[in-house]
Image (cartoon, rainbow, N blue to C red):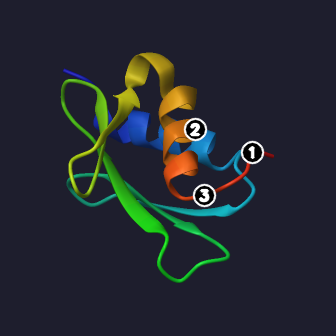
Amino acid sequence: MVDTVSRIQEFASAVRTHIDLSVRVVGDMPPRVQVRNRFSETLRETVTCSEDGAFLTSWGYRLGTVECVESAAARLAYLLAALPA
């Protein structure tokens, strides 16, 4: 079982490297990250971490796993049309 709270924090840090994204960590259960493109009213997503270590969007898309957090963050940035720093 994965420590989802620390993994969400790690994911949020990786997402913050993308300059077009605004990131907010919500510590409720389940812990989640709310991400939005700063230049759009509609490009936004909520990501959670499952107990088996998968990062999932609110609509069930699997971004990646805790083994490669940066890749999962990059996949979310791509979906939200953001650029890397």
Point out the residue furthest to the right here.
85
Q: Nearer the viewer, residue 63 or 51?
A: 63
> Residue 84 appears in which quarter of the rendering?
top right
Q: Secondary structure at mark 1?
A: loop
Tell me the residue that label 3 is attached to. Answer: 81
Residue displayed at 47% across by 78% down: 42
Q: Position of residue 23 (x, y in %)?
A: 56, 61
Q: Is residue 6 above or below residue 23?
A: above
Q: How many marks?
A: 3
Q: Position of residue 13 (x, y in %)?
A: 60, 43
Q: Amino acid at mark 1?
A: Pro
Residue displayed at 26% across by 57% down: 58
For the residues labelled 2 and 1, say whether their Cβ atoms are less than 8 Å apart.
yes
Q: Nearer the viewer, residue 38 or 12?
A: 38
Tell me the residue that label 2 is attached to. Answer: 74
Q: Nearer the viewer, residue 73 or 30?
A: 73
Residue displayed at 27% across by 44% down: 61
Tell me the residue that label 1 is attached to. Answer: 84
Q: Is residue 83 above or below residue 75?
A: below
Q: Earlier in the sequence, mark 3 or mark 2?
A: 2
Q: Secondary structure at mark 2?
A: helix
Q: Amino acid at mark 2?
A: Ala
